[in-house]
Amino acid sequence: VEQDSEDPWDLPELKDTGVPWSALDTKGKVLRVLVSVLKFIILLGLLYMFICSLDILSSAFQLVGGRAAGDIFQENSILSNPLAGLVIGVLVTLLVQSSSTSSSIVVSMVSSGILTVQVAVPIIMGTNIGTSVTNTLVAMTQAGDRSTFRRAFAGATVHDFFNWLSVLVLLPLEVASGYLYRVTELIIESFQIESGEAPDLLNVITDVLTEAIIQLDESVIGGIASGDSDARNKSMIKICCVKFNVTVPGVENCTFPTLCWVEDFNTIKWCNHLFVNTNLPDLAVGLILLALSLLVLCSCLVCIVKLLNSMLKGQVASVIKKILNTDFPFPFGWVTGYIAIVVGAGMTFIVQSSSVFTSAITPLVGIGVISIERAYPLSLGSNIGTTTTAILAAMASPGDRLGNALQIALVHFLFNISGIILWYPIPFTRFPIRMAKSLGNITASYRWFAAVYIILCFFVLPLLVFSLSLAGWQVLVGVGVPLVVMLIVVVVINVLQKRKPGFLPAGLRSWDFLPLWAHSLDPWDKVVVAFTAKCCCCCKCCQGSNDDQGHEDQESVEQSTEMRKAAYDNPAMAVEKEVEDEIKIELDIIKVAKL
């Protein structure tokens, strides 16, 4: 029996089904060039809309969950627990869908003295984890094709595993030694750093559209977190946002959408976006923007994937794949990955969002243009790129707050650098790639498991740890340590079963002694399939009954129409029919009364 030796992780060959270039005449070549240019322009437009939709999505999440995020940050007694701080960083970043926003809140709280730098370090680690859920959700949109979904989901979750593994090592190290705090404190004291301006790069282009839709006053979240009672009554939707150093004759003629009022010789103007004069609450506006941004994001992503599939074929695809995935010749092959890290950092610095960059390369991994081995260093670089933006933003702080703000930004930077040192230089230590491939194989066979993974890792696990940490260290250690030890034992046994089964007793060389549901997803898959089939069946039955009812109603209308025509032709028959109808109605009333 021949075994299928094809590796599911090999990049597929995107065959060109069109007419070869050499077989085209002059008109055909000109037409193909024009079509290719048009496709490229459309691709740029879709990428622009994709990035803008991510920005609007972040604003929507801030409107929906921003106040809750501020309330969470206000619990200073809880934040002093490192694990609780870590989980709060994860949950707040999930709520606002922006690590830069949650990090800026932490920086402002440290600058104002509400939090110390030591307390803020675990929160910064949590924001690093929370931001990686966006590209994982983007990978879910490619669940239609099994092979594409395997690569896309692995390419997205390699970022997740890197962040989780880094936290598992560096958080205990930080609690025990204060490594990140002490190193960044030494850097701040060693250099004379002057304040500066945070640059606007891609935002200059995207803000044209996003600020025409919605503008937020992000200081409201920081005000709630700082305990400002006035901030609770403020709307996060920005109303007045432009100031000019000019004077006006008076403010009595100042109406919307012209000048708003004059304050200290500054003319303050109404903002110019869709929701500036709305009476809707923040939650309603957030839900509207959430639905629209998700619709645009998914639509753009589907169109981008289809357009890339049509463009990246044949020789073009082979050239691009060769450029992206080929290593330098020996002995400089190891340099390629570090160049990819630099490229990822540079691209993220340009777009000023790691979520945007990693979400953009996820479809490319899915269709097979970028290998997961190359996506991994690109994702690591995006982690560094987003911290450099935070460093520049911190440098715009006032002089008296510059030290603490910059130290927190450097903590974020050093955390990611330390993670890269742990999980990249030595090929053996690149566990995130192997873990992501294993998860990709599972989700390719059981696609519903992708949703289970997201819910467990980003919601259930953080909430469980948060609840245990609230109960105190005794409860956390009593419940957490046995679970961690059991997890480590299971992982070790699994590795030995695959590589050195002879080291294990005969009974532990497989998990067959456990019930099938405890060591296989097949029984759970049958439950999910049966439940899904039942739901679909119910929907079809409801649709079928509605269709039948509509058919019966149409027949009754046709019968009544025929009866009216007959009654018009024969009045005696009409009277007889009315008597029969009255008798039927009386019989129906008697039946109902008996029931």
Image (cartoon, rainbow, N blue to C red):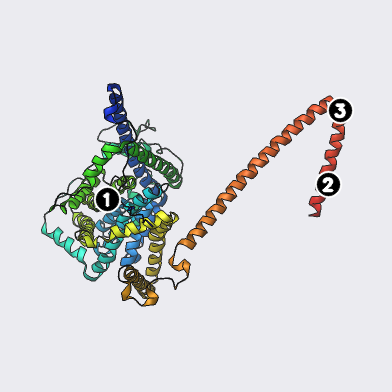
The front one of 233 and 166 is 166
Q: Residue 587 carries which label?
A: 2
Residues at discs 1 and 2 in contact (Cβ within 8 Å): no
Q: What residue type is labelled 3?
A: Pro
Q: Quadrant of residue 169?
A: bottom left
Asked if residue 16 is positioned above or below residue 164 in the image, the reply reads: above
Note whether residue 433 is visible: yes
How far separated are the C-alphas under marks 1 and 2?
Answer: 74 Å
Q: Position of residue 58 (x, y in %)?
A: 36, 47
Image quarter (top left, top right, bottom left or bottom right) of the N terminus: bottom left
The residue at which mark 1 appears reads as 375
Q: What residue type is labelled 1?
A: Ala
Q: Which of marks 1 and 2 is nearer the N terminus?
A: 1
Nearest to the eye among marks 3 and 1: give it: 1
Q: Quadrant of residue 595?
A: bottom right
Q: What residue type is labelled 2?
A: Leu
